[in-house]
Image (spheres, rainbow, N blue to C red):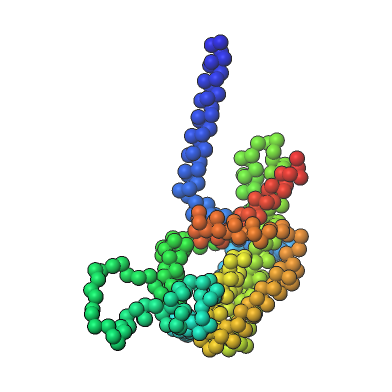
Amino acid sequence: MTATRAGQGYDALRIAAAVVGLAIVALLFWQTRSLILTVFLGVLFALAVSAGADRLQRYRIPRGISAPLLVLGVLGILAGFGTWIGPTVRTQTRELKTKLPEALQKLEVWVHSRGGGIIATVIGLDEDSTATGTPAAARSTAASPTDTVAVVTPATKPAPPQTLRDRIIAQLGGVTRFFVPFLTHTVAAVAGIVLVLFLSIYLAIDPSTYRRGLLYLIPESSRSRADRTLTAIAVTLRKWLVTQLIAMLVIGFVTTFVLLALKVRAAVPLGILAGLLEFVPTLGPILSSLPAIAMGFVDSPEKALAVTIAYVGIQFLENHLLIPILMKEGIDIPPALTLVMQALMAIVFGFLGVLVAVPVLATIMIAARTARSSS
């Protein structure tokens, strides 16, 4: 009886220790979540650098030289391109800042002229402001000619923004506060970029050392399966990253060319934005199309419609032609699952979570697939 009670007490102690240990690990992960996601980005880019170093090694170029040269070469190309196109981007960015509020105002007037309806509901205009084609706030200040009594009311809370432009500016303010707070911390952002670059170099120089060190943390009976899983994850993530980088370049150039052909204002910065946001699947192309469509309204609703059709066409060709050619034998992630994962990572981890949502989801799916096939 005494031995049974002692065994039960020992089991309870083990369970309590395991719970405390898991709580400590979870707390440590939460406190260092930004660092962990940054390191994951570094590993992701290191896979692409390692692929380039593998090719250069065939020409007897040591990895210790090829890996830094690849990273520095990419940075040099980006710096040269930025220097060459910088004046145009600065000029058109100023034009974009000036014309975008005007475009939003024209969009609101256009919605008013159509009587509001479902379009006003979708973009957030109230019925009162669409009833006569003028904002409600403006009409409320106009007095009737027969009014002879002035009514003084106590000070109340300011009414929420009524115009489309004010609504969007207010929403963007909320996004700045809650969705991308790291943008206000320049030092942290620069430090994260530097960390990603150095991780890419060091991991690409000698990936086998870090791989063996990671496998040593796994019980020996499971190392062979873990090694196969790591290989499958590395191959798929490398292919996904290279595909995304090529797609970013192609979409950036094609979008800029199409916007220039349509004579949309600020075509160059809008094309660059489309290329950069291409790194975020599904959500990125939608977000990049909104300012371009709004800029189309500066000239006419017809041009805005043409811009919308152009963006839809570009995405159709990308999803049905470019990506299938580049991403052969890759992992097929359902779009609905991608959206859910991006939303979850955005809520929990912010903008960094959005950046790594798809590769993290791919890693989980590959690990689950490998475990299922091995069992």
Give 143 or 246, whichever is nearer the viewer: 143
Q: Is residue 4 visible?
A: yes
Total numbered circles: 0
Query: Is 124 on the left-hand or right-hand side of 40?
Result: left
Query: Is 156 on the left-hand or right-hand side of 222?
Result: left
Q: Answer above or below: position of 364 versus 354.
A: above
Give 296 or 371, whichever is nearer the viewer: 296
Residue 208, position in %: x, y?
Answer: 66, 50
Give 282 or 110, whichever is nearer the viewer: 110
Q: Answer above or below: position of 84 versus 233.
A: below
Report the residue at 48% width, 39% height from top. 24
Residue 223, position in %: x, y?
Answer: 69, 40
Q: Answer above or below: position of 11 versus 33.
A: above
Report the residue at 24% width, 68% height from top. 154
Give 67 or 200, whichever is nearer the viewer: 200
Residue 69, position in %: x, y?
Answer: 60, 66
| Quadrant, the C terminus | top right
Q: Answer above or below: position of 227 versus 175.
A: above
Report the residue at 51% width, 81% height from top. 115
